[in-house]
Amino acid sequence: MRGLFSFLAAFAISVCAIAAEPDEVLADPALEARAKEIDVQLRCVVCQSQSIADSNAPLAKDMRVIVRERLLAGDTDQEAIQFLVDRYGDYVLLKPPIQGNTVFLWLFPALAVAASVAIAVAYLREGKTKPPKAARALTEEDDATIQRIIDEHSK
């Protein structure tokens, strides 16, 4: 049983370790290293939360193949990336550039944190600056009711 568990664990680790399939790997180790660096910068447009290096989707495989073809054709890393950006748009980049149509993506987290802090500070200050509600004075009727309750329970 322990041998089966070890086999399954090793298999799971090897499957998850890299999405690139053997037929995609370049013979030149330097080019393959460059391709892997590019792969982690590009988003799988099917998975959306994974890079093409981590995705097993058929489209991610196609994108990895394109990266390797572009590098074999003599493109620089940036030219290979730009080829895919031209084809799929800035969305394919895991770190999109700061420009007019992506500035919200970059500023939103900071704005959300700032707004949350401002709301929390305002809430905490409100509690300190508001005087506590004054207790109303007891009426003679309230005193009589309290005395009646005390007399009933003291018997």
Image (tube, helix red, strand yellow):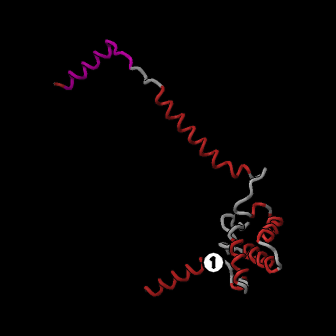
Residue 50 in the image: state x and y as whole percent.
66, 67
> Which residue does the numbered mark 1 point to in the structure image?
18
Q: Is residue 92 left or right of residue 137?
A: right
Residue 51 in the image: state x and y as whole percent.
68, 68
Q: Is residue 67 left or right of residue 133?
A: right
Point 75% across, 61% down: residue: 91
Q: Residues within 10 Å of mark 1 (few under 14, many from 20)?
A: few
Residue 108 among those drawn in magenta: no
Q: Nearer the viewer, residue 56 or 154?
A: 56
Where the C terminus falls, by quadrant?
top left
Q: Is residue 54 left or right of residue 12?
A: right
Q: Which residues are magenta?
A: 135-153
| Secondary element at image label 1 | loop
Please determine whether, in this image, residue 39 is positioned above or below residue 155: below
Point 56% across, 41% down: residue: 117
Residue 81 in the image: state x and y as whole percent.
77, 68
Point 77% across, 75% down: residue: 67
Corner quadrant of residue 23: bottom right
> Please, what is the three-letter code of the amino acid marked with disc 1?
Ile
Q: Main secondary structure of the magenta part?
A: helix
Extreme-left residue of the structure: 155
